[in-house]
Image (spheres, coloured by chain):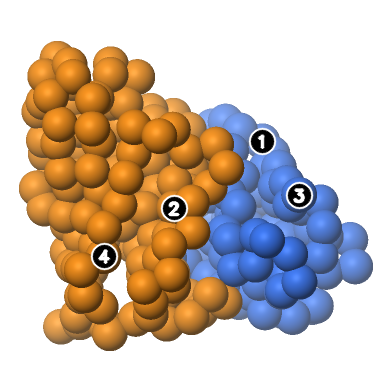
Chain colours: A blue, B orange
């Protein structure tokens, strides 16, 4: 069974600082997703990573994938208050099992950016 | 714009009173999912439809049922809501099982 673990679960940052959120998954996965969720809102898709070594960037966020280590990272550069939200990674179960296509989420990282 | 729509956005029901949540999509996607998200937790998949093929998660309570009368619509029925069923319910769609998931805005369910 695919398991996904994020750390840290809580992250308090000062504006202007850099930090990384880590996402480990337990079995092979074809796709890794990152989502943002604001309080009381739905999930907003940030990135989908499809292959080993994939790197995607959007503004102050950069996501990468190492399929050999079963690790994805979400790097925050020069944080601003608007980035405060909960960030989830999710891995897609591969073909061949009963969970094919199922998205398994990490626990979420609550990010708070302080002035 | 093509999108995933959920109605209502907020639903209050009484303990034990059946309730139905609605999801519709204009993306013409084959797969529709229902997730339950309790406060400060990750979304948890309840079930999904691949076209008309229903797939229930092993740990989804019998209290939760779903219907998909056509490609565009999918319903979540909670037969006898308990206080523990209060949550955000998220509908999502994807073109196929491995395609990107498009999430609706969610329905916040309160049980009194």
Query: Which secondary structure lies at badge 3?
Result: loop
Q: Mark 2 packing: few (<14 Cα in 10 Å), some, or many (20+)?
A: many
Mark 2 = which residue? B47
Q: Which mark is residue A1?
A: 3
User: Do the dots labelled 3 and 2 sit on one chain?
Assistant: no
Who is closer to the viewer here, A14 or A68?
Answer: A68
Whether residue A57 is situated above or below residue B28 in the rendered picture: above
> Who's the residue at 12% across and 24% down the image?
B17
> Who's the residue at 65% across and 60% down the image?
A99
Whether residue B103 is situated above or below residue B14 in the rendered picture: below
| CA distance separating discs 1 and 3 | 22 Å
Mark 1 = which residue? A8
> How many marks overall?
4
Who is closer to the viewer here, A44 or A73?
Answer: A44
What chain does mark 3 sit on?
A: A
Camera-near label (4 vs 3) is 4
Who is closer to the viewer here, B106 or B32?
Answer: B32
Camera-near label (2 vs 1) is 2
Q: Cβ–Cβ below 8 Å for labels 1 and 4? A: no
What chain does mark 1 sit on?
A: A
| CA distance separating discs 2 and 4 | 12 Å
Left or right, B65 with respect to A99, comes to left
**Which of the image's four quarters has the C terminus of chain A?**
top left
Mark 4 = which residue? B68
């Amino acid at each position: 069974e695919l398991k996904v673990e994020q750390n840290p679960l809580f992250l308090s940052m000062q504006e202007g600082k850099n930090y990384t959120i880590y996402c480990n998954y337990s079995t092979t996965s074809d796709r890794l997703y990152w989502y943002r969720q604001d309080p009381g809102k739905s999930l907003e898709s940030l990135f989908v990573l499809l292959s080993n070594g994939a790197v995607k960037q959007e503004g102050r966020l950069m996501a990468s994938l190492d399929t050999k280590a079963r690790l994805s990272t979400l790097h925050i550069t020069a944080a601003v208050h608007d980035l405060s939200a909960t960030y989830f990674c999710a891995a897609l179960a591969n073909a061949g099992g009963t969970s094919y296509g199922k998205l398994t989420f990490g626990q979420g990282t609550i990010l708070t950016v302080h002035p | 714009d093509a999108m995933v729509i959920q109605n209502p956005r907020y639903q209050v029901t009484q303990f034990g009173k059946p309730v139905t949540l609605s999801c519709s999509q204009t993306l013409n996607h084959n797969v529709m999912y229902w997730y339950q998200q309790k406060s400060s937790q990750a979304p948890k998949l309840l079930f999904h439809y691949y076209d008309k093929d229903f797939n229930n998660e092993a740990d989804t309570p019998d209290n939760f049922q779903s219907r998909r009368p056509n490609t565009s619509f999918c319903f979540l029925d909670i037969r006898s809501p308990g206080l523990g069923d209060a949550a955000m319910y998220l509908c999502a769609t994807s073109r196929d099982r491995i395609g990107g998931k498009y999430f609706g805005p969610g329905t916040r369910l309160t049980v009194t």
